[in-house]
Image (cartoon, helix red, strand yellow):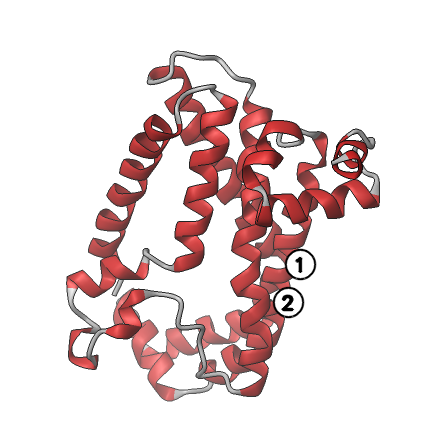
Amino acid sequence: MTKQNNLGQLPDGNPLNILYRIYQIIIQPRRFFNTTGWSSDFWVPILILTLAFASLRAVQLPEYMKSLDDPKTKTLIAKRSKITEEEASRVIERMKKIGPTLSILESPIIVVASSATVAFLIYLIGRIIFKQAIPYMNVFSLTAWTGIIASIPIILHIPLHLLKPEWVLPTSPVYLLPKSWQEHYFARVLVSMDLFIIWQVALLCIGTSRLYRVSLNRSISVIGTLFVCFAVLNALFIR
């Protein structure tokens, strides 16, 4: 217990404190949000998730570049954009040129934008439903630290992709369904019920209840309802 208290009192940026916080968010989330959940070290999980995402993009890049040479890709782009195949060829050439750069630049943009968006939704929930004005950066710290969970499947997927690009982590219930059900609407809803996504949502519920000092049941009812609505609506657009 003494060790935990001392670690929790180390200044932001201390490597030991950072490692301890990562351990806590994974193993002891309630203790984490009770003690060290709203610190300026939120850049740490952002950096970890960004590096993981960028690394996965890097190992996927050769396969992506190879797919651009597939004649079916040109036909598909021409059909979707309603352009000629000659124009689609020029589009593909531009995609080849910017592909490596884009794979690097999009990683921090996607990570920060997604964390900021979720933080903004929780911030609005706090203002409208919980009737509390918690500083936005505290909420952003909450969503940033839960991003540690999102980095786990990405990191695990990298060696799998290097061994065989077709392999994926079977962490969604959709893989339990017969192949004939894979395109069904219900299957598309289950895609959002990935175990790591549910884990991250659970941490958001715990963190929100601690940050806004509301019961965990109330936090689950609000955040959980928002998540289910997202899963249902998301299934309408993914194919």
Residue 37: image quadrant is top right
Image location (x, y in percent) of residue 122: 43, 29
Let me know if residue 101 appears in the view: no
Position of residue 17 in the picture relative to residue 89 (left or right): right
Residue 152: image quadrant is bottom right
* Label 2 Cα crowd, 10 Å radius (few <14 / some 14-19 / many 20+): some
Let me know if residue 192 appears in the view: yes
Labelled disc at residue 17: none
Q: Residue at x 33, y 85 (%)?
A: 72
The residue at which mark 1 appears reads as: 51
The residue at which mark 2 appears reads as: 55
Image location (x, y in percent) of residue 205: 42, 35
Q: Give the vertical position of 172 relative to 44 (above or below).
A: below
Of residue 26 and residue 104, the one placed in the foreground of this image is 26
Residue 35: image quadrant is top right
Whether tag 2 and tag 1 are in contact, CB under 8 A, the answer is: yes
